[in-house]
Image (spheres, rainbow, N blue to C red):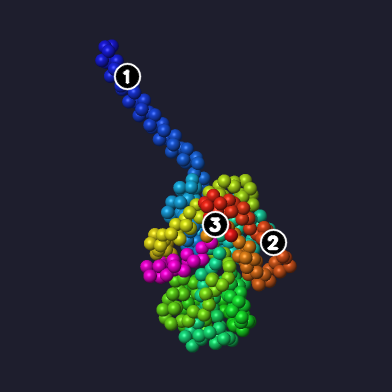
Amino acid sequence: MTKRHRMESDKRAIVWGLITTVVVIMFTSGGWCQEKRTKIRISNAGFTLTALPLLAAKDWGVFSANGLDVELIVMSPTLAAAAVAQGDIDYVAGVGPASVAATLSGLPSRAIWFSSDRITYWLQSAPPYKTLQDLKGKKIALSGGVGGTNHVALMIALEKSSVNPKDYVIVGIPGQQAQVFYSLESSFVEAALLSPPHMFGAARKGFNKLLDVGAMVEMPGGGLTTLIKTIQSRPAEVKRVIHALQLAKDEVRKSKPKTVELIMRLLKMDKEPASETYDTFQTTLNPTGIPNRAGIDNLVRSLQAQGRFTDRKVAFNEVADDRLATEVAKELGYKQP
């Protein structure tokens, strides 16, 4: 072999070596990323406003950027408690009466993160009723029934307004907020507890806003619940989930156009109510995500209003574990109270 042939042979060997190295790196890197991306399943009661940071984390790729392959599963809170107990799901997207009741009934779970620490509800009345005094003895419609989160929040707000909640007739309306709004429009009731976007439609139609219930009462909206064993055995994973949700929530707060587009697309709203919904919702967001005692206490109170767990004085750490959310908040540099 001549010197020239040897040089050409050496060059080809170098080129093929580089190509092989690049291919190996590509496959190795891809495999490494795949191994590192943790598969988790999160249940969610539905595509609702309180789930917005969760939906944003999935839709905007925040979970993926944090090494998480997340599957969102629509499931009722009752079924979710059974599913997390059996290991079919890893996390329940929500901290509310159902999740707290499951914990107090023996499910070894804890609330680990709050999305919002206030719910978005206005008490709105028909035009003739301009004050709470005018409304005494009249019917107030709300979704669900007595003892639910919104019912207890309304009772607390009425007490804070120096009126007796027993002076009003509470009417639970089955179904969604649209049915509650219809009950007000059709004069079946004189007032209703409404959330976005129906509260804005009611205001445009001349119904009076008597109370901003959400602004008056600390009550979790959305959040995250998981088993104690998950917190203890997979703390790094749990922190990544909380970290991703916090980043998505921060993006929701900072980027109105991007979030309004998400609300329009996923929650099926027109642009104007989506924009109004965003403005109201962002004021409810818990800045740090750390579960707070007032919110948990009010959830327990909502259950006791139903006659459940009335013989117990429930401590915060029986229901919530704020340690990992606190660590994430510190790492993200949030100012803590």
Is label 2 in a helix, a strand or a loop? Answer: loop
Q: Amino acid at mark 1?
A: Asp
Q: Is residue 103 visible?
A: no
Mark 2 is on which residue type? Ala
Tell me the residue at 59%/83% (across/down): 168
Distance between mark 2 and mark 1 Cα atoms: 74 Å
Task: Indicate which disc residue 292 carries.
Answer: none
Location of residue 155 with respect to 299 vertically, above or below: below
Q: Nearer the viewer, residue 173 or 116?
A: 116
Q: Are marks 2 and 1 in contact (CB under 8 Å)?
A: no
Figure check: 146 above or below 11: below
Q: Is residue 8 magenta?
A: no
Report the magenta residues as a range: 268-286
Element class at badge 1:
helix
Q: In x, y percent, where is residue 228?
A: 64, 52
- Image coords of residue 220 (percent x, y): 57, 64
In the rendered image, which residue does mark 2 sit on? 315
Please state the horizontal and vertical placement of residue 277, each as a whole percent of the image: 44, 68
Check residue 335 in the rendering and tell me which mark sits there, or answer none: 3
Decide: is 190 above or below 219. Answer: below
Other residues around mark 1 within 10 Å, as few (<14) / some (14–19) / many (≥20): few
State the residue in front, 63 or 297: 297
Q: In whole angstroms, how far apart are the C-alphas of marks 1 and 3?
A: 61 Å
Q: Among all residues in the image, which is located at the extreme top?
A: 1
- According to the picture, the residue beneath numbered tag 1 turns out to be 10
